[in-house]
Amino acid sequence: MKYLSRSFLMRLILERIVEVKNKYQDKLFELEGVVGVGIGGSEENKKIKVLVSSLTDELSQKIPEFLEGFEVIIEKVGDIKAY
């Protein structure tokens, strides 16, 4: 029986979470108050991060807790301005 190396498994997980983030980010950006979508968490526990300008109960309810098995975390960052 062959075993997969830890680094190979971590790479597979990273590739998968990038696919999931890319699949849903446009839909998340449609929600008023969402200013960014990224990936966070530890190497072993990757999460999808949704950055919001302000967090309301209404917005919190519209953002799913999980996307295709990956936990979604919401982070209030305020307004983001490009200079």
Image: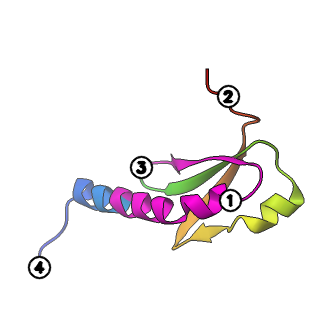
Q: Horizontal and vertical percent for residue 76?
A: 75, 42
Find the magenta span and give its range.
Answer: 14-42
Q: Please, what is the three-letter code of the amino acid marked with disc 4?
A: Met
Q: Amino acid at mark 3?
A: Glu
Q: Which residue matches tag 1?
A: 30
Mark 2–mark 4 Cα distance, whole angstroms, equals: 53 Å
Distance from disc 1 to disc 2, alpha carbons, whole Å, reads 18 Å
- Which residue is identified by label 3? 43
Q: How far is disc 3 from disc 1 in space, using C-alphas?
A: 29 Å
Question: Which mark identifies residue 1?
Answer: 4
Name the amino acid type tagged 2.
Lys
Q: Is residue 58 rendered to the left or right of residue 68?
A: right
In this view, the residue farthest toward the bottom is: 1
* Residue at (73, 59) in percent of width and height: 31
Examine the image and state in which quarter residue 72 appears.
bottom right
Quadrant position of residue 26:
bottom right
Mark nearer the N terminus (1 vs 2): 1
